[in-house]
Amino acid sequence: MTVKTVPQRILVTGGAGFLGSHLCEALLRSGHHVTCLDNFSTGLRRNVRHLEHTDRFNLIEHDIVTPLNLEVDQIFNLACPASPPHYQADPVHTTLTCVLGSMNLLELAQRHGARIFQASTSEVYGDPSVHPQVESYWGNVNSFGPRACYDEGKRCAETLFFDYHKSHGVSIKIARIFNTYGPRMRPDDGRVVSNFIVQALKGDDITIYGDGSQTRSFCFVDDLIDGFLRLMASPDTLTGPVNLGNPCEFTVGELARHVIELTGSSSKMVHCPLPTDDPRQRRPNISLAMRELDWQPRTTLLAGLKRTIRHFDRLLANPDHEFAE
Ligand code: NAD
Ligand code: UDP
């Protein structure tokens, strides 16, 4: 989707990350002025290097835990490590990023009358007892386990967004994002799609955590970004939360078999311990997004995996591979 409005001054926090860099690109394509803000904890400069020639693009190194002031019309808050090993590496900073970081951006939105989007997550449903997950389900989250810094941080961010909306009239949009993959994930990201593809391409063992029967539903990045743009452009009354993800559900074992087949790899599958509190099943109910945003994913898992495999193939052959893909 391209947003046909007058050009806006848009802040994308976490803009040098996997999703953020694709979002910056899409916003620039629509003619907007984009400020990409990042602390480069998991994001990479090379993700946005191809955008730096545009005079409508501006890159700022900043941590959202520290307050900031910028003239903006819209804010997309994507700043937060998303991969379990990355968000668990400094759990206190992850919670602060979600909570203090969100509050700093909500203050900014209030000061400038800007609309603000929050990249929330399917992790707010925890290890869900309702399947598929619908927005009205309150979730099943361990408040002090290893995933809590992220899950509870994102839940508290949703609370802050709604309280700034109700108390201060801030225009909010909350997307609950389900597992998304695609080009520009880091080879050392640690999430399942990038791990399996990199392992397969290198001929290393494919590390299946647990017996591989746990499920996830994988959305290709282009489909997700289209959902972001539609949600941000929707009427003020649609605050969300809105599930954005692909409702086709696969076991982790099935994913491994698809990756091995598509790469033609001779890698073997090995089983490793299942991480604590790893959700057993996950699949979005996307009726709300279909109805209100006329949105649904278009890319099949096999088509999306092929494009992602090509990205990693080039990257492994040449670590300086230009990321303008
Ligand atoms: P990512 O790790 O590639 O990107 C996160 C970006 O935020 C990085 O560039 C990182 O350097 C930056 N960042 C982290 N903490 C920051 C801070 N305190 N201040 C400034 N910048 C900071 O992850 P991603 O997959 O692109 O995820 C982007 C957002 O989407 C995250 O908020 C994540 O929680 C959310 N999300 C992603 C998925 C997914 O499957 N990709 C699923 C659910 C939610
Ligand atoms: N997983 C796996 N092998 C890996 C990485 C992850 O089997 O090398 C599993 C993980 O235990 C989980 C699923 O794949 O059940 C998705 O993990 P990921 O970290 O990508 O995302 P999340 O658990 O946050 O959904």
Image (cartoon, grey):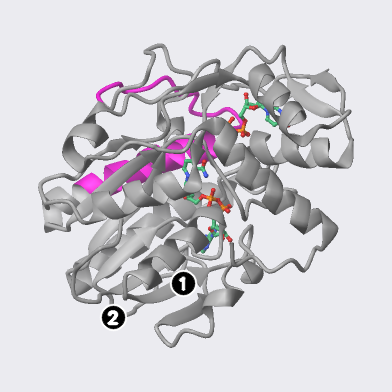
| Residue designated by label 2 | 71
**Crowding near the residue tagged with mark 1, few <14, some 14–19, many ≥20 C-alpha atoms within 10 Å:** many
Highlighted range, magenta: 136-162
Q: Is residue 1 magenta?
A: no
**Residue 131 drawn at (x, y percent):** 39, 14
Please give the name of the residue rendered at 50% of the width and 42% of the height, measured from the top-left corner. Answer: 220
**Residue 12 drawn at (x, y percent):** 41, 66
- Mark 1: C-beta under 8 Å from nearest atom of ligand 1: no
Identify whether 11 is placed above or below 131.
below
Please give the name of the residue rendered at 72% of the width and 11% of the height, measured from the top-left corner. Answer: 211
Q: Residue furthest bottom?
A: 55
Image quarter (top left, top right, bottom left or bottom right) of the C terminus = bottom right
**Residue 241 drawn at (x, y percent):** 26, 38
In the rendered structure, the answer to whether residue 55 lies left or right of residue 280 reads left
| Circle 2: residue type | Glu
**Residue 179 drawn at (x, y percent):** 51, 35
Please give the name of the residue rendered at 36% of the width and 60% of the height, measured from the top-left corner. Answer: 76
Q: Nearer the viewer, mark 1 or mark 2?
A: 1
3D distance between C-alphas at marks 1 and 2: 13 Å
In the rendered structure, the answer to whether residue 237 lies left or right of residue 32 reads left
| Residue designated by label 1 | 36
Q: Secondary structure at mark 1?
A: strand
Image quarter (top left, top right, bottom left or bottom right) of the N terminus = bottom left
Q: Is residue 149 magenta?
A: yes
The quarter of the image that holds ligand 2 is: top right
| Circle 1: residue type | Cys
Examine the image and state in which quarter residue 316 appears: bottom right
Q: Earlier in the sequence, mark 1 or mark 2?
A: 1
Identify whether 200 is placed above or below 42.
above
Please give the name of the residue rendered at 55% of the width and 32% of the height, measured from the top-left corner. Answer: 301
